[in-house]
Every structure is written in structure tokens, then in C-alpha cells.
């Protein structure tokens, strides 16, 4: 293979990878809670994780946006702030042992409401 063909291949590959990265960034852009697309829950909702196995956290309501190593398990308690019409909830989880908190998106079907948090607005 000539050097020119190799360089064209490298440039094409870099452009293609850049396009995929840009596409991933677009898909993983978090929508604005409180918009028509993502209505806020008022007051926020206390939820418990149901079902079996891990419930994956996502950085945006899109299956391509998984947060590696971030998940909750059945019986974990979350606070839901907003929900999309297509089955995603914007949530926060605080680990009761460490106090560490994480926010993200999970599939709403795995959540069961247990009450509300704070006064109604």
C-alpha cells in the first residue's frame, strides 16, 4: 500500500470516528426538565426500584447513553424529578452508607412510587 493511500485511509477513519463521537454527543444531550418533552413532577416523587437485577443509569434518556458502572438494585430508593412520555425518569440516588449521590435517567417501568417529597407547587 502506498503512503498516499494509507494517509487517505487514516484521515477517513479519523473523520468517521469524529462523526460517531459527535453523533453520540448529540444523542446523549440531556433534555431540559420542565419542558413539554420532559414535564417536571411536582412535588418530586419517592420511588423504589422493582424487578430483578441491576437498573442501569443513563446520562440522557437514550439506550446509547449508559453510565458505565452506575446502577441501582431492587429495593433501592430514588427521587424522581421528571418523566418523559416514552418511559424514562430523571432521578437521583443517594447511597445510604456513603452519602454519595448520583443523578441520571432510568427506565420508569422499574420504578414504583412510594410517595412524594416536599410540598406541592
Image: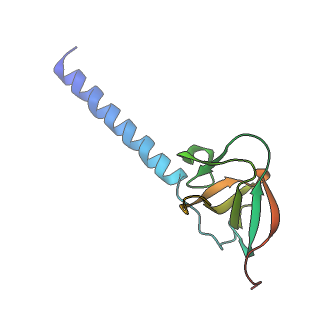
Residue 4 visible in rendering: yes
> Does residue 77 sit above or below 119 in this rendering?
above
Position of residue 80 measured from the top left corner of the image (x, y, whole percent): 70, 65
- Quadrant the C terminus occupies: bottom right
Position of residue 27 measured from the top left corner of the image (x, y, whole percent): 54, 51
Tell me the residue at 75%/69% (across/down): 45
Name of the residue lying farthest toward the front: 97
Residue 85 visible in rendering: no
> Does residue 108 sit above or below 69 in this rendering?
below
> Does residue 2 sit above or below 47 in this rendering?
above
> Does residue 116 sit above or below 64 in this rendering?
below
Position of residue 5 measured from the top left corner of the image (x, y, whole percent): 24, 22
- Quadrant the N terminus occupies: top left
Q: Is residue 23 left or right of residue 34?
A: left
Position of residue 84 measured from the top left corner of the image (x, y, whole percent): 72, 61
**Nearer to us in this view, 26 or 41:** 41
Name of the residue lying farthest toward the top: 1
Tell me the residue at 47%/51% (across/down): 25
Tell me the residue at 27%/34% (across/down): 11
Q: Is residue 100 left or right of residue 8?
A: right
Amino acid at each position: 500500500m502506498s503512503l498516499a493511500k494509507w494517509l487517505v485511509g487514516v484521515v477517513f477513519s479519523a473523520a468517521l470516528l469524529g462523526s460517531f463521537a459527535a453523533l453520540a454527543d448529540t444523542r446523549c444531550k440531556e433534555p431540559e426538565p420542565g419542558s413539554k418533552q420532559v414535564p417536571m413532577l411536582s412535588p418530586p416523587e419517592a420511588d423504589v426500584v422493582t424487578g430483578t437485577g441491576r437498573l442501569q443509569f443513563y446520562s440522557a434518556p437514550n439506550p446509547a447513553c449508559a453510565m458505565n458502572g452506575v446502577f441501582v438494585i431492587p429495593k433501592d430508593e430514588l427521587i424522581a424529578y421528571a418523566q418523559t412520555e416514552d418511559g424514562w425518569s430523571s432521578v437521583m440516588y443517594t447511597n445510604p452508607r456513603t452519602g454519595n449521590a448520583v443523578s441520571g435517567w432510568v427506565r420508569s417501568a422499574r420504578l414504583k412510587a412510594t410517595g412524594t417529597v416536599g410540598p406541592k407547587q
